[in-house]
Every structure is written in C-alpha cells, then in structure tokens.
Amino acid sequence: MSWSTEELSIVVLSLKVAAVGTLCSLPAAIAVALALARGRFWGRSVLNALVHLPLVMPPVVTGYLLLAVLGRRGVVGAWLEQTFDVTFAFRWTGAAIAAAVMGFPLLVRAIRLAVEQVDERIEEAAASLGASPAWTIVTVTLPLALPGILAGFVLGFAKALGEFGATITFVSNIPGETRTLALAIYAFSQVPGGEAQIWRLAMLSVAVSFAALLASEWLARRVRRRH
C-alpha cells in the first residue's frame, strides 16, 4: 500500500496538531485536576462542569465559540493580531487549540482519578517532615500519579487526533494548513474516486485510536496495582 505525498503531509500535520495541542494543555490539566481532587473551595462543582462542557456540547458550538473569541474579529483574537500580529483562525495553531479544548476534559478526568488514588497520608507525612504544599505535589503526588497522567495524555492525544467539528468550524478545511485526518476523510468523501484514500486514512485512524485505548488501559491497570 503506497502513500501519496498529500496523505503523508496530512498524517504529519495531524500528529503535530494533536501533539502540540495536548502538550500545551497538559500543565493546565494537571493544575485543574489537582484543584478538583484536593481542593475544597466554593465553585468547585462549577469548575468541574465547565471542564467537561466540551464533551456534552456539540463540537460545532465549541468551534464557533473559539472563532468568536480567538477569530480575527473576536474579542481576544483581534487584540492579539493588532498587538502581536498573532492569528489563530484558519491556521494550524488554531487547529491545535481546538484539539486541546476538545481533549482537555479527558486529560483532566484521567489525572484527577490518578491523584485521588494517591494516599493522602503519604502527603501528610511529607508535610510533617517540612515539605511545602507545592514541594509535596512535585515530589510525592505527581510521581505517584504519573501513570494516570500518561494515560490521560494518551487519551487526550487520541481525542485531539480525531477532532472534527470544532476544528472545521474554527479553522476550516485548508489543504496543507488545517486539513487533519478527520477533515481529510470528510473531504475525500465529497469527491468521486476518493474511496481508496478514505480507507487508508480511516484504517490509520482506527489503528492509532485502538493503540491509544490499549495504552491507556494498561497505564490505568498500573495505577490500580500500585495502590
């Protein structure tokens, strides 16, 4: 099975968008997961609902909100373009943002569950020995929750790789710029004779998603064995 230059560029772009989106959202996901798992504050339920909102809203709505905020005429997007000459709409960086937003809930949920599995008595022991809360998180909580963090990263990456609705609404379907795997499959389905390309890209998408789910399950089992 031979791959064309166009198909290879689609795969490379999809991997870049998914990796950049997931990596950039990882620090925020860890912070939010720690807040939800260990925090006791007013509005915790609201924060949890906001985090999971992209999972229950139509992806097109999420994409439109991103366009309204980060588009060239958006509240933030217009200011970024005028001040720093930075544009996200109809750029691959915008596709990475859309992928990050859609994968964020899965990332947070997996990390939160891993943090909740960490025995708080171990953290209390570290604190009794003089460790600050931040140092306890860095040296105790996060290392123990590492398999869950990795599992969340894998799930977030897989979700980002297959994102369609928010991406096409926010950055359109531009060949070589924003056409990821999901968008390419849709585009090839609209033209005669695109079945062969659809099957190749679809099989690749299934393989990557299946591998991601297996990896996530394996890491989750490691978390359960550890605790």
Image: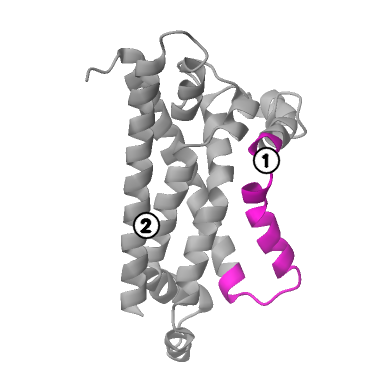
Total of numbered circles in the picture? 2
Residue at x 63%, y 23% (from the top left corner): 85
Query: Image quarter for residue 108?
Result: bottom right
Where disc 1 sits, the SS reads loop
Residue topped by disc 2:
216
Q: Nearer the viewer, residue 181 or 47?
A: 181
Dot 2 surroundings within 10 Å: few (below 14), some, or many (20 or more)?
A: many
Q: Give how far apart the Cα atoms at labels 1 and 2 are.
A: 25 Å
Residue topped by disc 1:
58
Residue at the extreme top? 192
User: Type of residue at label 2?
Assistant: Ser
User: Type of residue at label 1?
Assistant: Pro
Q: Give whichever of discs 1 and 2 has the lower sequence position.
A: 1
Residue 189 in the image: x percent, y percent?
Answer: 49, 18
Residue 102 in view, yes or no: yes
Residue 158 in the image: x percent, y percent?
Answer: 43, 44
Residue at x 33%, y 68% (from the top left corner): 221
Residue 87 in view, yes or no: no
Where disc 2 sits, the SS reads helix
Q: Which residues are magenta?
A: 36-61
Q: Is residue 74 above or below residue 147?
A: above
Location of the C terminus by quadrant is bottom left
Residue 48: say if magenta: yes
Q: Are marks 1 and 2 in contact (CB under 8 Å)?
A: no
Q: Nearer the viewer, residue 63 or 209?
A: 209
Dot 1 surroundings within 10 Å: few (below 14), some, or many (20 or more)?
A: few
Position of 127 compared to 79: left or right? Answer: left
Q: What label does residue 50 carry, if any?
A: none
